[in-house]
Amino acid sequence: MVGERRRFLPQPTPETQPFWDGVNQGELRLLRCDDCGFVIFPPRSFCPRCGGRKVQWFRASGRGTLYSYVIHHRPVPGYTPPYSIAVVQLEEGPRMMTNIVNCPQTPEAMELDMPVEVVFTPIGEGLSLPQFQPAAGGR
Amino acid sequence: MKPGSVAIIGAAETTELGEIPHTSQLELHCDAALNALADAGLRPSDIDGVATAGESPVAVAHLLGITPTYVDSTSVGGCSFMLHLRHAAAAIREALCTTVLVTHGESGRSQVGRAPFQGGFGLSAQFELPFGAMGPPTLFTLPALRYMKTYGVTEEQLAMVAVVQREWAAKNPRASHRDPISVQDVLDSRMIAYPFRKLMCCLITDGGGALVLTRAERADEFPRKPIYILGGGESVETPMVSQMEDFTTSRAFRVSARKAFEEAGIQPSDVDHLMIYDAFAHLPLYGLEDLGFCGRGEAADFVWERRTAPGGSLPLNTNGGGLSYMHSGMYGMYALQESVRQLRGTAPAQVPKARISVAHGVGGMFAASGTIVLSNQAP
């Protein structure tokens, strides 16, 4: 990245590859612990709650609520300011960083706790990002 | 740790602070170290323990000509120096070494002799940076809106943190910014990452600091009033701010502070002077609550009512803080330096009769924490 103005791309590891493969195929995938049922994010090969090593991928609903955000006013490769950097509370339990899209990038339009749903945004090179938009039907 | 069994006998910052384009980062460590050693009346050859972050203790020891029997390279961000003090106190008590030098130097502004940010393969690089996050202004700030909504904190109250700290900085000739500012000035300053304006964000400067510690029973051999380490705490939570358990409170703050206060045998009401690492304006609010100085959601009113301002009941960030004094990147060392100055009675904005000072640091973006309780009285 040094000296170049390129978008920062995720660099998957063997443990996280299925998450990003899912995103590129239009699916939000999470892990669930076979032993205690805990839903795990970010991905890893074990459960941080019980220490169990049997974890399974599943397709998440893609629904959640807006937990917190900032509206960045400075340019970053791949983004045009002002744009939101947000954290959503997923229905299944974990939270994840994302952007709120298809919505004015204003505090008035982005109310905390509003329902949001995942959209998969192509960013080139066959890759996508899991972003979120206000849920259809609203609150 | 037995409270007060180890004391700080030397403390100093770099000769210059602010913009130091003619000095490399490693040399800033050494400048601060030589100043702290002179303060203690010692030479490098008197040191047998070295602790540092940001640079390798190997490099620092080598350049200064030190042959250590104790080395600590704990590097968990800007609070690393609080952890170094805690570890050094334990090491001295266990006779792993006798006299420890803790150094910090950072060419945060001029970027002389330091590696550029490489991105990398960490969890944040994979699950945060692809979403247009660009460093602390977009990451450290992320929990604030949730905190503000939960407790009804206004943008004006957030701005007030910066206003009050500027009042402290005005009293400090070494502070980078000393001109008074109003709440409106803060709100009118350039928007960086809503709700954070420029004046709610820390400075980026060059500088350093160093501390020298030894057994308290030796403290009379040295020229300065010894500052006793009564207790310390440390913890970590997450390398990704998005994965904090609760955006309204820092688990690392709570765990670290509780441990330090318990070890020192003190309550918040015993504290005369407080430093809370303020990389951004919301940090003192989280710190005041997580350390137990305020109830949940009460910190913004506490600051608004000028309780932490000059003349208030709880003098906080009396050097002007990272918002107005200086912030090289790993600010924790400067918080410790100000605690030592206050307890020695040599601070530019001196708190009358300060006996107990707490320096509380954060590392990364709510990733880590370290807390040190200091006193100028032997327990």
Image: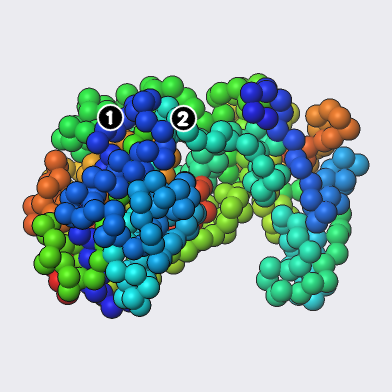
Q: Which mark is residue B89?
A: none
* Left/right of residue B148 with respect to residue B272 in the rendered view: right
Q: Is residue B148 above or below residue A128?
A: below
> Quick one: B44 or B255, which is closer to the camera?
B44
* Left/right of residue A122 with respect to residue B341 in the rendered view: right
Residue that protrudes farthest toward the right in the picture: A25
Q: Within 10 Å of the Cα at label 1, are there few (<14), some (14-19), or many (20+) other Cα atoms?
A: many
* Left/right of residue A2 with respect to residue B274 in the rendered view: right
Q: Within 10 Å of the Cα at label 2, are there few (<14), some (14-19), or many (20+) other Cα atoms?
A: some
Element type at mark 1:
loop
* Left/right of residue B31 with respect to residue B127 in the rendered view: left
Q: Which mark is residue B111?
A: 2
Task: Name the residue: 29% across, 57% down.
Answer: B45
Q: Is residue B269 above or below residue B22?
A: below
Viewport quadrant of the N terminus of chain B: bottom left
The chain that hosts pointer 1 is: B
Task: Name the residue: 12% across, 57% down.
Answer: B224
The answer to whether any part of residue B165 appears in the image is no
Spatial separation of the CA atoms under disc 1 and disc 2: 18 Å
Q: Which residue is mark 1?
A: B176
Kindly identify the amino acid type of the residue bearing the numbered disc 1.
Ser
Viewport quadrant of the C terminus of chain B: bottom left
> Quick one: B105 or B120, which is closer to the camera?
B105
Q: Do dots 1 and 2 share one subunit?
A: yes
Task: Name the residue: 21% across, 33% down.
Answer: B174
- Mark nearest the camera among 1 and 2 is 2
Mark toward the start of the polypeptide (1 vs 2): 2
Return the x and y of residue B353 as percentages of the image width and height: 8, 57
The answer to whether any part of residue B179 appears in the image is yes
Return the x and y of residue A73 as percentages of the image width and height: 55, 24
Return the x and y of residue B128 as percentages of the image width and height: 66, 42
